[in-house]
Amino acid sequence: MRLPSPSIRTRLALALLLALPLAAQADPRKDYDEFRAGLTQQASGATGMYAIQDVRVIAAGAGAHLPAGAPAAALRWADGAGGAKDVRLRFRDGAAMLEGPGLKPVDLLKAPDQTQALAGGLSVRATVYDDALKAWLYNPARVGQTFKGLSFFPYDPKGVIQARFARRPAKAVSHLDSRNHTGTMYWIGDVAVPLQGKTYTLRAFNKSGDWSGIDHLLLFFTDKTSKKTSYGGGRVLEAHFPAGQPPQTLSLNLNTLYSFLCAHSDYYNCPVNLTTYVPVALEFGEKYPPGG
């Protein structure tokens, strides 16, 4: 799936994608506090959402480069191999090789956090994007110009609920995303979620279709707050469990609902047809717009 790319849980585990505790655990209030702190870091950090300066998708066998001589704030990816004075990135045989003046050649996919620092405070990160590579260019100076903070509903203990999970064989589901690309997610089961006296059944998704390695599920919501006090495109709730061993009863913490990442940056790909509308106001988790 291209939502979020990279996902919040994964980045936080690497650094959020970063250890962002989005599933309810022993102390739901602590989870909420850590969730807010983690999401804020994911937004405002040196390689956070608001530090993104440019992104380029590189097909297998192809390359891109950062032209030499451009000011840091104006630097953007250009197609092609580039020259000896440029920072060059090539995706071939499963490796994302970065090289350039003053850089020791490195496979970004094997580097810590898949990231390499560059001159001028910039950094480059690589993530696999279907059969291609997504090259991220970050400039932390942008954060102070564009990041106004995040907004959250106050913690509410009523947002901690018990839901029933019915596992199913993983089924591939094709979906469109916010950038008109086609992606694939796997429908791995159904979650019966009690909300304000009624129970709503939501499809649970995962990026993987291999149950032996699946250790979390994703629920995609829209509700009566959407386009009003929460992001209109939808929000995400995660629930985690031991790999391949989902429980029949899940503890969900709605206080850790977060917006699709395309609410914060046009460089993310978010699904537009996987959400379930629930006709209640879920005044939990992340609000929108940021800083509002």
Image: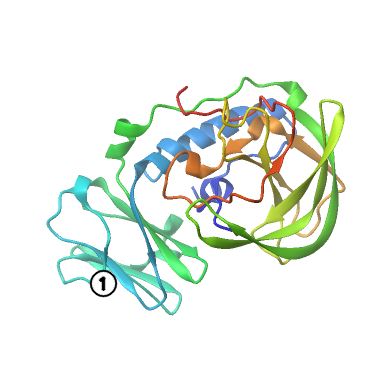
Residue 174 placement: quadrant: bottom right
Q: Position of residue 99 (x, y in %)?
A: 26, 68
- Residue type at the position of mark 1: Gly
Q: Position of residue 196 (x, y in %)?
A: 82, 25
Residue drawn at x 43%, y 66% as measured from the top left: 133
Q: Position of residue 50 (x, y in %)?
A: 38, 39
Residue 146 placement: quadrant: top left
Q: Which residue is mark 1?
A: 80
Residue drawn at x 72%, y 33% as measured from the top left: 253
Q: How many marks?
A: 1
Q: Quadrant of the N terminus?
A: bottom right
At mark 1, the secondary structure is: loop
Between residue 110 and residue 90, name the one nearer to us. 90
Between residue 10 and residue 1, name the one nearer to us. 1
Farthest residue, direction left: 69
Q: Position of residue 9 (x, y in %)?
A: 58, 47
Left or right? Give the position of 6 relative to 255: left
Crowdedness of circle 1 by 10 Å Cα count: few (<14), some, many (20+)?
some
Residue drawn at x 71%, y 29% as measured from the top left: 28
Left or right? Give the position of 92 relative to 173: left
